[in-house]
């Protein structure tokens, strides 16, 4: 694989021609995109199975470009047929550990303000040293959880985000606050007095404390229970490291490690453990070795 990549690196670039056709029908504008390969370049060295995967991926995308050179005349078009199809938009794919950290590193892609976008291009949220630790902390305090390999938000995390968006400190739920702070810190590095920025931070913290106090949380179920404690019948919750009983305040000390014998305890395993008293079966096989004695 390393050898193939090395050869690709020193081959000519892949060249293609992209053509977009804008067709207006009444008040509706339709855009068709065509791609024509001019020179395969480094892609000629791709393994056959990789080429098939790329082709299949492009065919499965709704907005995939068409192939071939369109033979059209500007200002005229023949309508062969038209039909209306009802479809539903799909939600964006759930994050994994890797894709979540990548999104945090490239957060400028979701910021609309051009000034903020520019400031976040090379910074992201946090640094490479703190991103993984931030995700781990969010998992440990119960704002995020694992669904197999995917990282999803919990009821507790969703409640925090939705509640903050209704307050005067809704900027906490947006990466634009990070961009604004980066601008201020850059100005300080250039010689601007930090006093104004420090005062703004102090005022923001005071406002945040008052706003958070005003968030109602009565009768709100913030915990995602994944099972029933076998000791006290309270709900079980999951963190990155442990499966805990929510009845600890009442003296229950039941817990399980989320990773047993180098294997993560899934919800299905937990269900088997709670209902059948067994988590998993281990089959130990003795290895017999033959020794030859040399005289």
Image (cartoon, helix red, strand yellow):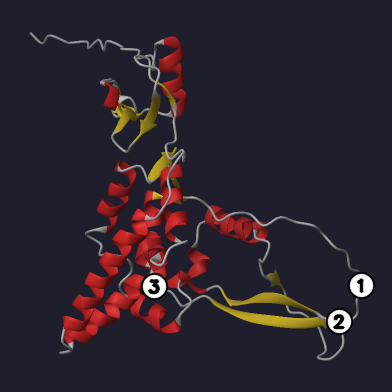
Q: CA distance from mark 3 to mark 1?
A: 48 Å
Q: Along the line of sight, which residue is nearer the eye, 217 or 272?
A: 217
Label ID, residue 100: none
Quarter of the figure with the N terminus: bottom left
Query: Which residue, given by chain and number where applicable, does mark 1 sit on?
Result: 80
Query: Which residue, given by chain and number where applicable, does mark 3 sit on?
Result: 176
Label ID, residue 26: 2
Inspect this view and state whether residue 5 appears: yes
Q: Residue at x 63, y 54 (%)?
A: 90
- Foreground mark, 1 or 2, reads 2
* N-term mark: 1 or 2: 2
Query: How far across and down, in percent of the image, does residue 269 sit?
Result: 43, 22
In the picture provided, is 120 more to the left or to the right than 220?
A: left
- Foreground mark, 3 or 1, reads 3
Q: Residue at x 35, y 16 (%)?
A: 232
Quarter of the figure with the C terminus: top left
Crowding around mark 1 (Cα neighbors within 10 Å: few <14, some 14 to 19, many 20+) is few
């Amino acid at each position: 694989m390393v050898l193939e990549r090395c050869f690709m690196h020193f081959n000519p670039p892949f060249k293609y021609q992209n053509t977009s056709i804008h067709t207006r029908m009444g008040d509706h504008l339709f855009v068709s995109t065509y791609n024509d390969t001019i020179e395969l370049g480094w892609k000629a060295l791709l393994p056959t199975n990789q080429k098939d995967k790329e082709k299949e991926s492009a065919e499965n995308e709704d907005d995939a470009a068409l192939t071939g050179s369109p033979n059209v005349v500007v200002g005229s078009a023949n309508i062969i047929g038209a039909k209306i199809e009802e479809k539903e938009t799909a939600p964006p794919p759930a994050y994994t550990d890797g894709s979540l950290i990548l999104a945090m590193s490239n957060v400028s892609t979701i910021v609309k303000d051009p000034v903020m976008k520019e400031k976040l291009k090379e910074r992201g949220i946090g640094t490479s040293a703190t991103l993984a630790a931030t995700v781990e902390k969010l998992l440990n305090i119960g704002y995020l959880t694992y669904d197999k390999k995917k990282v999803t938000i919990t009821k507790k995390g969703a409640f925090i985000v939705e509640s903050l968006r209704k307050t005067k400190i809704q900027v906490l739920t947006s990466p634009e606050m990070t961009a604004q702070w980066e601008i201020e810190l850059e100005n300080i590095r250039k010689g601007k007095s930090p006093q104004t920025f420090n005062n703004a931070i102090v005022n923001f913290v005071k406002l945040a404390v008052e706003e958070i106090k005003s968030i109602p949380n009565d009768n709100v179920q913030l915990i995602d229970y994944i099972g029933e404690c076998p000791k006290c019948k309270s709900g079980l919750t999951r963190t990155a490291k442990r499966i805990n009983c929510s009845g600890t305040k009442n003296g229950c000390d039941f817990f399980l490690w989320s990773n047993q014998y180098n294997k993560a305890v899934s919800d299905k395993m937990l269900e088997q453990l709670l209902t059948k008293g067994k988590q998993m079966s281990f089959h130990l096989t003795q290895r017999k070795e033959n020794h030859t004695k040399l005289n």
